[in-house]
Amino acid sequence: MQLDLAKFADAAACRRWAAEEIDAAAGRARSRYLTTVPGQEATYTAKYAQAQAYIAAAYPADTTPYPWVAQEASRTGMTPTQAADRIKATGDAWANVIGPAIEGLRIGGKDGLEARLTIPDVLTHCRSVIAALEAV
């Protein structure tokens, strides 16, 4: 993180830089939990939706309508029930705890920049937000 106060023309420039740093820190936090390659987000979404549907259907023996669950079970040696439960538990943790925590810190951190009127205050706030994101 840049700490040289002289590199900023004014507090507004520092706030713009800090907003980018906060976004980058949120991205790093997300990447500790998600695989960040093209197409993976869609894969997670599809798997999670199918696992939820399979569970809501009371774990039917016929997994034909649930290829994500069936393939994960087949390739891991799990039963479809175990695979669906694992997919759902992972998705629930992301959707209900981890993802919202990261996004709340990111948005709150960026929104909090406007109240910082000096470069040192902006940098202190930015460091605090980044430390919180690193702790997630």
Image: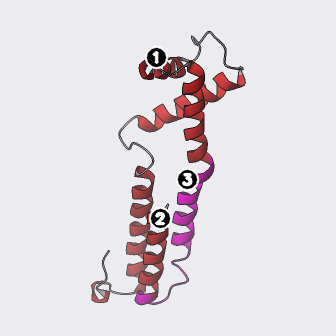
**Secondary structure mostly seen in the magenta stretch:** helix
At label 3, the amino acid type is Ile
Q: Report the magenta residues as a range.
A: 96-120
Q: Position of residue 58 (x, y in %)?
A: 71, 20
Identify the residue position indicated by label 1 in the image: 74
**How dense is the environment of label 3, judged by Cα within 10 Å: few (below 14), some, or many (20 and up)?**
some
Q: CA distance from mark 1 to mark 2?
A: 35 Å
Q: CA distance from mark 3 to mark 2?
A: 11 Å
Of mark 3 and mark 2, the one earlier in the sequence is: 3
Q: Is residue 136 left or right of residue 32?
A: right
Residue drawn at 32 percent across, 88 percent down: 5
Identify the residue position indicated by label 3 in the image: 98
What secondary structure is found at the residue carrying circle 3?
Answer: helix
At label 1, the amino acid type is Ser
**Does 136 sit above or below residue 31?**
below
**How dense is the environment of label 2, judged by Cα within 10 Å: few (below 14), some, or many (20 and up)?**
few
